[in-house]
Image (cartoon, rainbow, N blue to C red):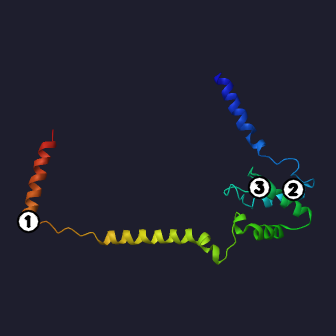
Amino acid sequence: MRRLAMLLLALFLVAGPALGALSPDEELADPALEARARALSKELRCLVCQNQSIDDSDADLARDLRLIVRERLLAGEDESQIKAYLTERYGDFVLLTPPVRPATWALWFGPLLLLAGGGALCVVFLRRRRTGLVEPEPLGPDEQARLRALLAERGKETSP
């Protein structure tokens, strides 16, 4: 029974990628156009899944968007025209890589600013910590005599 379960699990894992493949009605007859469609589909976000491209998603909306991409490629539009159409319809969110403009500066430069700010805070903290250390005062004659006596006493304890 356990072998059967393992076999079914292995079969499911091997067949998984085939389950997410394009359906025959989505594929274009021209291999060059199909390659362009697949490349463009990898750059567009599935609006349902939000973290997958429409090429990877199995959602119905992703399928519809893949069909739109293929229809527009067949009509002779290029990738930039198709992206413009989809962003006009769905906004910049449909693009997996949003354009660099003032509205998206936080997305592009925010992580760099946070990293630089964190690094600057670490440098300031470490410098303050280093300069905040106080040098100990040298031992006086009484303390030096006491230290020698303690070390001599300890030396007697550890010798065989």
Query: Given this view, does label 1 or label 3 mark the residue nearer the observer?
Result: 3
* Rendering coords of residue 39 (x, y %): 80, 59
Residue 99 placement: quadrant: bottom right
Residue on which disc 1 sits = 141
Q: Amino acid at mark 2?
A: Glu
In percent of the image, x 70 and y 37: which residue is there? 13
Other residues around mark 1 within 10 Å, as few (<14) / some (14–19) / many (≥20): few
Q: CA distance from mark 3 to mark 2?
A: 16 Å
Q: Secondary structure at mark 3?
A: helix
Q: Amino acid at mark 1?
A: Pro
Q: Secondary structure at mark 1?
A: helix
Q: Amino acid at mark 3?
A: Ala
Query: Given this view, does label 1 or label 2 mark the residue nearer the observer?
Result: 2
Residue on which disc 3 sits = 62
| Mark seen at residue 34 | 2
Residue 58 vs 6, above or below: the answer is: below
In percent of the image, x 34 and y 72: which residue is there? 128
Q: CA distance from mark 1 to mark 2?
A: 90 Å
User: Can residue 38 be seen from the camera position used here?
Assistant: no
Outermost residue on the top side: it is: 1
* Rendering coords of residue 59 (x, y %): 74, 51
User: Can residue 120 be seen from the camera position used here?
Assistant: yes
In percent of the image, x 10 and y 48: which residue is there? 153
Of 147 and 159, the residue lying toward us: 147
Q: Quadrant of the C terminus?
A: top left
Q: Secondary structure at mark 2?
A: helix
Other residues around mark 3 within 10 Å, as few (<14) / some (14–19) / many (≥20): many
**Mark positioned earlier in the residue sequence (1 or 2):** 2
Q: CA distance from mark 1 to mark 3?
A: 84 Å
